[in-house]
Every structure is written in C-alpha cells, then in structure tokens.
Image (spheres, helix red, strand yellow):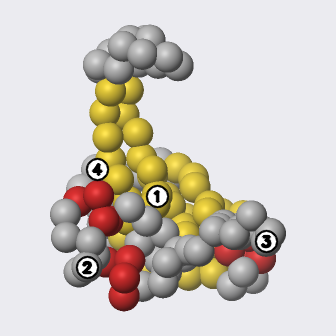
Amino acid sequence: MFLSLKSAQALPMTMLWHSNGGRYYAPWSSRHFACLGVEEGAASPILGNVENSFTNNHGDIHLNPDRQVEVTHVIGALRWRSGAKVIAVETLGKQLLVRSTKNQEFLVPFDPQALNI
C-alpha cells in the first residue's frame, strides 16, 4: 500500500499519472515507458473553474522571493492484504499505527515533527 501523509491545507490534491513515452522533448526524450506516478499538489485551477477551485477555500501558498515556504510530506509503502481497507491511522509517540478491515495492524517508525504534528 502506498502511504502519503501531508497537510491537506497545503497539498489538497493527489494526482495519479502514467507515462508511456509520449513526451518526446527533453528531459524525458520519450524514455519513460510503463511509468506510474503519484504527486501531491495544489493545482485544482488547472481542472477548470478557477473561481470555484478547491484551493480558493483551503489556503493558497503565496510565494515571495524574500521568504522561505516549507511544505512537509511523508511517503512510504506497506505490505498490504488484497482487499483490505484502511480504517485508522494514528500516531503513537514516534510510531505510526495503521489498521485495516482484515485485522491487520502495522506499527512503523514515524517522526511526528516531520509533519509538525
């Protein structure tokens, strides 16, 4: 299972994409084949109506060359039973507990300060 922990305020979207050599220009030069990707972002205005976009109501990141902006994000992967659904994710000190519908529990190392929680 792919695990992505982030601030939904800063990164409200999860985008899934695939590449099969379609970008012929540099730096890809048609070299990405059978590639799947996951990206977190705040790009909902590209999907249509900018005035009613998700980010308008959930805090934009305003960039300024005179200050630093930091967006934290933690990713990982767990061996997961087919068909199991996540029912809980919680922090326990410096560990993360992930529970599934098939009585599966994972307790993995996690630094809550990485996400400022």
Measuring 58% from the left and 55% from the top, which residue is drawn there?
75
Where residue 10 appears, as percent x and y from the top left, is 53, 74
Where residue 89 appears, as percent x and y from the top left, is 49, 77
The local secondary structure at tag 2 comes to loop
The residue where tag 4 is placed is: 82
Q: Earlier in the sequence, mark 3 or mark 4?
A: 3
Inter-mark Cα distance, 3 to 4: 45 Å
Q: Which amino acid is tagged 3? A: Arg
Measuring 56% from the left and 74% from the top, which residue is drawn there?
61
Q: Which amino acid is tagged 1? A: Glu
Q: Earlier in the sequence, mark 2 or mark 4?
A: 2
Q: Nearer the viewer, mark 2 or mark 4?
A: 2
Inter-mark Cα distance, 1 to 2: 21 Å
The local secondary structure at tag 1 comes to strand
Q: Is residue 100 visible?
A: no
Q: Which amino acid is tagged 2? A: Glu
Measuring 36% from the left and 34% from the top, which residue is drawn there?
36
The residue where tag 2 is placed is: 51
> As rendered, which of 87 and 40 lies closer to the eye?
40
User: In the figure, residue 74 lies in which quadrant?
Assistant: bottom right
Where residue 45 appears, as percent x and y from the top left, is 30, 65
Q: Which mark is residue 40?
A: 1
Q: Earlier in the sequence, mark 4 or mark 1?
A: 1
The residue where tag 3 is placed is: 67
